[in-house]
Image (cartoon, grey):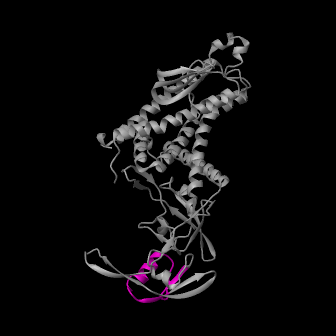
Amino acid sequence: MLASPSLLTTIVAFVLLLGPLIVIHELGHYLVGRWFGVKADAFSVGFGKEIAGFTDRRGTRWKLSALPLGGYVQFAGDMNAASMPDPAQDTMPPEERARTFQAKPLWQRSLIVLAGPLTNLLFAVAIFAAFNLAYGKVVATPEVGAFMPRSDAQAAGLKVGDRIVAVDGNRIDSATDIPQYIVPYPGRTVSLAVKRERRTLIVPVKLSPRVESDEFGNKARLADLGISFIVPIVDDFPAGSPARAAGIRVGDRVLAVDGRPVIGHPDILAAVTPRPGQVVPIEVRRDGQRLTIPVRLQSDIVRGSDGKEVRVGRLGIALRGGDIVPVGPVEAVALGFEQSLGTMKMMATGVGQIFTGERSVKELGGPIKIAKYSGEQFTLGWPQFVSFVALISINLAFINLLPIPALDGGHLAFYAAEAVRRKPLGLRSQEWAFRTGLALVLALMLFVTINDLAALPFFGG
């Protein structure tokens, strides 16, 4: 387990994480508002008392405020940072009132509000797309190569060689498609459609809850089928490989070793390990043909569990767990949207499970937990940290779209009601709704902060 980062590293990482995301979110509101001709009175990073700032030639006050856990754009016609309408706008001169937020058509106000969370989502898409373009995508055959200890899939009746083609009716083309339908659902029973030989079977699998820890000791409750998708297809050779020297090629599928059928990696180990230095026939399938290739196994000395040295046989092949497939710009962006929306769906699933009691409210996290995780990811390197930034950006988009007054989703709910009623809600109704929403948000912040503190080692977490 890795040591936790220092307090200074955590603070720096938290600022590098949250600062840009707040600016990006509020810029979404600001730029779309400016596009529609709305005057912005203030653009603030943080809440409360102003620490530093300046006023531009358009009259917008750009400022850094004392509480750096959010931000806001206050448009002309807003009474406060929560964008409650100011009754005084009715007495403004017509040309000045035309530049207020409230004077704009409903569809323009809706787009201005939606622009904040949408910008956060697009920022995450851009990050994922950049990674996809730089590293490609992983494609792995969803064929069972082996089972992990205490595998739920094996207990349900799956066998090595089965190919998973659907999970709960969702089509599976690659093993990388499977986790989104499995990981968030500990305790549930999922239906797997598998191809076995020439038959398609439907196998219900009860997913046992598992608690997994990362390299910093952070625990997460999740589900796992307990399957390895490494299949007996040759993917690479280590230096000095006897298999390569004998004529085995990348892409060959190992069918048998010394006459013993091979279904998964364990079968190869069981046939090869006891035969150091011997010549054994390896049967492979290549381009639709079955070939038998004699291979003199490598002889290695390893130390056994009892501490004694023992000689073992090595074939010298690395089996296929997945291919890295390069992608172009269009596919990289499409994958970025798919990954971002999939992450948001998993967040919605988690929140729903908390409301239904499937997950504990202790799994909710707030600013302290985000700061802790940001410091940890920062120490792992820039790729890991930037991926975490994308995750939190999606999180901000998701939270702001919740239909809670004082959040962007609450404003959009008001506009939906206005579209149905053909007139806005009364100012008094809006004021009470905003007060209730603000109280709910503050109560939630207090609760998750207490959760975060309770999870710290200092408090026994």
Q: Position of residue 79 (x, y in %)?
A: 59, 17
Q: Position of residue 146 (x, y in %)?
A: 48, 71
Viewport quadrant of the C terminus: top left
Using the rendered image of the protein, determine whether residue 114 is visible from the camera's viewpoint.
Answer: yes
Residue 272 lies in magenta, yes or no?
A: yes
Q: Quadrant of residue 10?
A: top left
The magenta segment = 253-281
Indicate the quadrant containing the N terminus: top left, top right, bottom left or bottom right. Answer: bottom left
Q: Quadrant of residue 190?
A: bottom right
* Position of residue 40 in the picture relative to residue 351 (left or right): right
Residue farthest along the left direction in this orientation: 307
Q: Nearer the viewer, residue 438 or 269?
A: 269
Q: Is residue 236 left or right of residue 452?
A: right
173 falls in the magenta region: no
Foreground pick, 70 / 193? 70
Residue at (56, 40) in percent of width and height: 398
